[in-house]
Amino acid sequence: MEFSTPAWDNWLFWLINDTLRARLLDWAMPWASSAVLLWLIVGTGLALGVRRYRWAQLAGFLILLLALGVADGGTNLLKEAHGRLRPLNAMPGVHFVEDGRWQVRPPDFTPVKKTDSSYPSAHAANSMAAAVAIALLWRGPRRYIWALPLVVGYSRVYLGKHWPSDVLMGWLTGAGAAFLVVGLVLLLCAGGLRVRLPAQPPPPGR
């Protein structure tokens, strides 16, 4: 599917990827964009839930993982349907990281790809799905968890991997996935879904 980039999308991309560059951000944004950050947050919480035998909390983290799976699967379907080129593969002058170092596309760069996987951003979708699910399931982290999708989404544009509209659609996809999964679970629980343990066997001799 042919994908035209609106003026606001192009302007905001260059503002983040070029105009607002800084050494501190050059160091921090690759870390913020790493999938390790998201899975470290989820894995740490899951480990703590198991360690303390808080099975309700453990169930919440399993719901969170399911929301992440739905968000990731949804973005993959949209990527295949649109095939939008990533900025670093579409234009000269884009700053990006490759082989662990920052690079810039030369002025004579011409796209060699016809399709790519830019729209929407899976990183943005997964981080927003995690934030929404956590906000719905736990009260404590609500105040701070929204920083996760904001920082991750910003990093994807800063790294030249996505257009701002890719990030926006990723956020919408992730939020939708989280609301869908959590809503279905609550609906099933309200409908009387319960886990039933097998009956204890009678004592010997009876």
Image: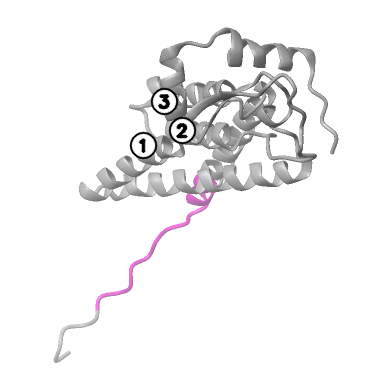
User: How packed is label 2: few (under 14 Cα within 10 Å), some, or many (20 or more)?
Assistant: few
Q: Is residue 32 left or right of residue 50?
A: right
Closer to the camera in the image, 163 or 136: 163
Mark found first going from the N terminus, 1 or 2: 1
Q: Which mark is residue 100?
A: 2
Q: Which residue is mark 3?
A: 145
At 63% across and 35% down in the image, what residue appears?
173
Residue 163, image quadrant: top right
Q: Where 138 falls versus 64 (above or below)?
A: above
Q: Which residue is mark 1?
A: 41
Closer to the camera in the image, 91 or 80: 91
Q: Position of residue 172 (x, y in %)?
A: 63, 30
Q: Where 193 falls versus 182 (above or below)?
A: below
Q: CA distance from mark 1 to mark 2?
A: 23 Å
Could you tell me if the residues under marks 1 and 2 are in contact, i.e. CB atoms within 8 Å? no
Q: Position of residue 27 (x, y in %)?
A: 41, 21
* Three-letter amino acid code at the position of disc 1: Ile
Q: Position of residue 66 (x, y in %)?
A: 50, 49
